[in-house]
C-alpha cells in the first residue's frame, strides 16, 4: 500500500492507495483523517490519467520563431503550440529570462505559486527568484485566501498559523465557526465538529447564510454582509463591559488591555444596540451578549474561513477573533485555540517556506519587500514586470478583476506556466511545462494545523517535479543549487529554518506519517499546541489590538437608509469541486453528479417573484458580468442576497470583482459585492 496526503483542501487527510486496484484505502490510524475521507479524497485522484493531461512541454509557435526555430520541425499540439523536448524548453526559458533581466532589470521578473505543490518546489521557487533572478517578487495563492490570517495572527499572537490541532475540537465545550462553510469546504473538520456537538459541546455559527452547520448550532448568528468586524467587536464589548474576561490570563499573558478597553468602549458602533438599527438583523442585539457569556465561560475553539478573510477588513477581523481568545484565555491550552481553515493542501507550507513577498523562509524579514500578486498585475500593465512564472495557480481564473488580469497577461513579454492541464492561464503562456501531480511525487505538505506530511507517489511518472524544472532553468542561468532529490531540497530548507523544521528529516516524517508532527519540530517531536507558556511575539505576550469597524456595503446602506437596493452576492466552494476544477472536473466519479456541471446561483425563495421565477440569470457588477448561470431558490439564503460558486472559468464569476481588497495584505474582497440581476431565461 502507498501512502499520500489528499491534494485538495488544507485539512490534509492521509490516504492509503492500492496501486493494483487503483483504489483509495482509508487509513484509520491517520491522525487527521481517522479513516474518513470526503468525496474529493476518495475519488479526486481520478484525473491522473485523463487524456488532456499536459505530458511534455508546450511552446508557443511565435515564441519558437523568435529564436529562429521553425515550428514545423516539432510535433504540433494545436494551432498555437508545438511540443518540444524539455531540454530545449529549459534552454529557451533561461535565454529569455536572461535577456529580460539584462534589458529591464531584476525587478522585471515575478513568480507566483506554490500552494498546490510541495514545500520543496515552493522553497526552490522563491530561492530561484530571490537568488538567481535577484527579484523580490514572489507570492502564492494565500494572497486570495488566508494572507489576512497570517497578518492578524502575527500581530496578536506572533505566529501566522493555527495554534492547536483539529483534535482540540474534541476537548472544546464551545466551537465557534465564523465565515466557513465547513461541511462543504473542509468536510473532515466538520465531522469533528458534529461529533463533538453530539457529545454535548455547543456550536456557534456566524455567517451571512444558513450553511449546513446551522442545524447543529445553539447560537445561529445570521449576520449582514460586510459585518464580521462589527459583530466580533460587539462580542468583545460585552465581554469587557460586563467584566467577563479572564483577569489572570490578561494580566500574566497579554499587553495592551487598558488601551484596548478604552478604545473599544469609546467606539459607539461596537454596542450591540447597533444591530437594532439594521432591519432584518435585530436578533443579533440579543444573540451577541448570550454568545459573549458562553465564550467567556467555556473552553472555546475558534475556526474561520474565507468568509472572514476575503473582505477589506479581513486582517482586522482576524485580530478581532484573536482578541476574543486573548480576553477569555481561550488559547494555548487544551480545548481552546485559533484555527484558520486554510484552503489549499500546501498553502500553509508555501507561506512557511518563504513564497511571500514580505517573508523569507521561516517568516524572517527580507532585505527587500517584493510585490503582491495584485501589485504584479499593475506592474505588468505599467511595463515594469515583463516576465512572469506561474506554478500551479490559475491566475487567469481564480483571482479577482479578471478583465484587468487578462489584459495584463496579454501584455507580458514572457509567461512560463507549470501545469497539469490546459486552463485559462496556459492560454496566455509562451512556455508550458507539464509536471508531476501531487500523487506522482515525493514531498512535504503542511496542512492547516502545521502538520508535516511526507507524501509518497501513488503512480510513477516520467514528468519532472516542479522543483526539477526550476533547478534545470537555474543551471542554465549559471546557478546549480546541487539538489538531486526532493530530500536534498528539503534538507536545505531544514538548515535554513532549523527552529521550525530542523527535527523533521524525511526518515522521521516517513516513520511518523500517520501521526505526523506539527511544526516546530525539535528532535523529531512536533508541537501540538502553540503558545502554552508564552506567545511568539517579541515580548512573549499576546497583543490585544482594537480596530474600529467602518460601515460599508450592506451595513452602511442599512444604517443610512434602513434598506438596501439590488442584491449582495457572496461566493464559495461546493463539496464536489475544488477551486478552478482543473483536477476535480476531470474525475469520472465526481462528474456523475448533476450539481457538478455548472456553477449555480442560489437565491432566496422570497425573491422568486422579484426574479420572475427565473431559470437562468446574469449577474452584473460595476466591474463586469458573469455568464448566464442557472438559478435555484431556497430558504437558506436571506432575502436580497445571493450565493454562487466559482469553479468553472466559463461562468466568469471572478469578472464581477474589482480591486477592493484587504487594506493590509490586498486579499480580494470576494465575499461581498453588490450586483444587479438580469433574468436571461
Ligand atoms: S477534507 Fe480536504 S483533505 Fe480531507 S479528503 Fe476532503 S478534500 Fe481531501
Image (cartoon, helix red, strand yellow):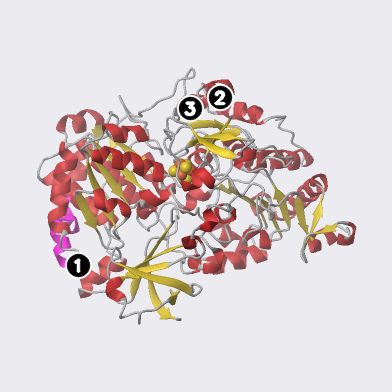
Mark 3 vs mark 1, CA separation in Å: 48 Å
Q: Looking at the rendered structure, which numbered label has been put on residue 414?
A: none
Task: Say what secondary structure mark 3 lies in.
Answer: helix
Q: Quick check: 330 above or below 185?
A: above
Neighbour class for label 2 at 10 Å: few (<14), some, many (≥20)? some
Say which residue label 2 marks: 510
Reading the image, the residue beneath label 3 is 514
Percent x, y of residue 23: 57, 39
- SS majority, magenta: helix
Where residue 230 sits, quadrant-wise, is bottom left
**Callout 1: helix, strand or loop?**
loop
Region in magenta:
264-279
The local crowd at label 1, few if under 14, some if 14 to 19, many if 20 or more residues have their Cα within 10 Å, is some
Residue 215 falls left or right of residue 411: left
Pointer 3 local density, CA inside 10 Å: few below 14, some 14–19, many at least 20: many
Q: Distance between the Cα atoms at labels 3 and 2?
A: 9 Å
Q: Residue at x 30, y 75 (%)?
A: 607
The tag earlier along the polypeptide, 3 or 1, is 1
Q: Considering only vertical position in the picture, is 483 above or below 141?
A: above
Is residue 182 in view? yes
In front of the other: 200 or 623: 200
Tell me the residue that label 1 is attached to. Answer: 280
- Seen as rendered, the residue at the extreme left is 242
Does any portion of residue 10 appear in the rendered image?
A: no
Q: Would you say 160 lies left or right of 213 here?
A: right
The question of residue 50 being in magenta is answered with: no
Q: Do the residues labelled 3 and 1 touch (CB within 8 Å)?
A: no
Q: Nearer the viewer, mark 3 or mark 1?
A: 3
Amino acid at each position: 500500500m502507498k501512502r499520500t496526503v489528499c491534494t485538495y483542501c488544507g485539512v490534509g487527510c492521509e490516504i492509503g492507495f492500492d496501486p493494483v486496484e487503483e483504489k483509495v484505502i482509508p487509513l484509520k490510524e491517520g491522525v487527521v483523517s481517522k479513516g474518513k475521507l470526503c468525496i474529493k479524497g476518495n475519488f479526486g485522484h481520478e484525473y491522473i490519467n485523463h487524456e488532456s493531461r499536459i505530458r511534455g512541454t508546450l511552446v508557443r509557435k511565435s515564441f519558437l520563431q523568435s529564436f529562429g526555430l521553425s515550428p514545423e520541425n516539432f510535433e504540433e499540439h494545436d494551432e498555437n503550440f508545438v511540443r518540444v523536448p524539455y531540454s530545449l524548453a529549459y534552454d529557451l526559458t533561461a535565454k529569455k529570462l536572461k535577456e529580460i533581466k539584462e534589458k529591464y532589470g531584476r525587478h522585471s521578473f515575478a513568480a507566483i505559486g506554490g500552494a498546490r505543490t510541495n514545500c520543496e518546489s515552493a522553497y526552490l521557487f522563491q530561492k530561484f527568484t530571490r537568488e538567481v533572478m535577484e527579484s523580490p517578487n514572489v507570492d502564492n495563492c494565500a494572497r486570495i485566501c488566508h494572507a489576512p490570517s497570517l497578518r492578524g495572527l502575527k500581530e496578536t499572537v506572533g505566529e501566522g498559523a493555527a495554534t492547536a490541532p483539529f483534535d482540540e475540537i474534541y476537548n472544546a465545550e464551545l466551537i465557534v465557526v465564523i465565515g466557513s462553510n465547513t461541511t462543504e469546504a473542509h468536510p473532515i473538520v466538520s465531522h469533528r465538529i458534529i461529533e463533538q456537538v453530539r457529545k454535548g459541546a455547543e456550536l456557534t455559527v456566524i455567517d451571512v447564510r444558513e450553511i449546513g452547520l446551522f442545524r447543529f448550532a445553539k447560537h445561529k448568528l445570521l449576520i449582514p454582509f460586510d459585518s464580521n468586524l462589527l459583530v466580533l467587536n460587539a462580542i468583545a464589548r460585552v465581554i469587557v463591559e460586563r467584566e467577563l474576561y479572564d483577569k489572570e490570563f490578561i494580566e500574566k499573558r497579554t499587553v495592551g488591555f487598558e488601551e484596548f478597553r478604552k478604545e473599544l468602549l469609546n467606539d459607539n458602533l461596537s454596542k450591540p444596540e447597533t444591530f437594532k438599527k439594521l432591519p432584518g438583523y435585530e436578533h443579533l442585539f440579543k444573540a451577541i451578549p448570550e454568545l459573549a457569556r458562553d465564550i467567556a465561560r467555556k473552553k472555546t475553539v475558534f475556526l474561520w474561513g474565507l468568509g472572514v478573510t476575503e473582505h477589506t477588513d479581513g486582517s482586522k477581523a482576524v485580530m478581532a477573533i484573536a482578541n476574543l481568545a486573548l480576553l477569555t484565555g481561550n488559547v494555548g491550552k487544551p480545548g481552546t485555540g485559533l484555527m484558520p481553515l486554510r484552503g489549499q493542501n500546501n498553502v500553509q507550507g508555501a507561506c512557511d517556506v518563504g513564497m511571500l513577498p514580505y517573508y523569507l523562509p521561516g517568516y524572517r524579514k527580507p532585505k527587500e519587500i517584493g510585490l503582491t500578486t495584485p501589485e504584479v498585475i499593475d506592474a505588468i500593465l505599467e511595463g515594469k514586470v515583463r516576465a512572469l512564472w506561474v506554478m500551479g495557480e490559475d491566475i487567469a481564473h481564480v483571482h479577482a478583476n479578471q478583465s484587468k488580469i487578462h489584459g495584463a497577461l496579454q501584455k507580458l513579454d514572457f509567461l512560463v506556466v507549470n501545469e497539469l492541464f490546459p486552463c485559462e492561464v496556459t492560454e496566455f503562456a509562451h512556455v508550458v511545462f507539464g509536471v508531476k501531480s501531487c500523487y506522482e511525487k515525493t514531498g512535504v505538505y503542511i496542512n492547516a494545523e502545521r502538520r508535516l506530511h511526507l507524501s509518497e507517489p501513488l503512480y510513477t511518472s516520467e514528468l519532472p517535479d516542479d522543483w526539477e524544472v526550476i533547478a534545470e532553468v537555474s543551471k542554465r542561468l549559471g546557478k546549480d543549487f546541487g539538489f538531486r532529490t526532493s530530500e536534498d531540497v528539503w534538507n536545505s530548507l531544514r538548515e535554513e529554518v532549523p527552529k521550525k523544521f530542523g527535527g523533521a528529516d524525511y526518515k522521521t516524517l516517513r516513520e511518523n506519517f500517520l501521526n505526523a508532527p506539527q511544526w516546530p519540530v525539535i528532535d523529531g517531536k512536533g508541537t501540538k499546541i502553540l503558545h502554552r507558556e508564552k506567545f511568539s511575539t517579541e515580548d512573549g505576550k499576546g497583543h490585544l489590538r482594537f480596530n474600529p469597524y467602518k460601515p460599508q456595503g450592506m451595513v452602511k446602506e442599512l444604517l443610512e437608509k434602513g434598506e438596501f437596493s439590488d442584491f449582495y452576492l457572496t461566493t464559495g466552494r461546493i463539496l464536489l469541486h475544488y477551486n478552478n476544477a482543473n483536477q476535480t472536473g476531470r474525475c469520472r466519479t465526481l462528474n456523475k453528479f448533476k450539481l457538478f456541471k455548472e456553477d449555480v446561483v442560489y437565491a432566496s425563495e422570497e425573491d422568486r417573484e422579484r426574479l420572475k421565477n427565473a431559470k437562468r440569470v446574469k449577474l452584473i457588477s460595476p466591474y463586469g458580468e458573469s455568464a448566464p448561470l442557472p438559478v435555484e431558490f431556497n430558504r437558506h439564503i436571506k432575502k436580497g442576497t445571493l450565493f454562487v460558486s466559482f469553479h468553472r472559468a466559463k461562468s466568469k464569476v471572478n469578472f464581477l470583482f474589482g480591486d477592493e481588497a484587504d487594506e493590509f495584505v490586498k486579499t480580494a474582497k470576494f465575499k461581498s459585492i453588490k450586483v444587479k440581476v438580469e433574468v436571461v431565461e
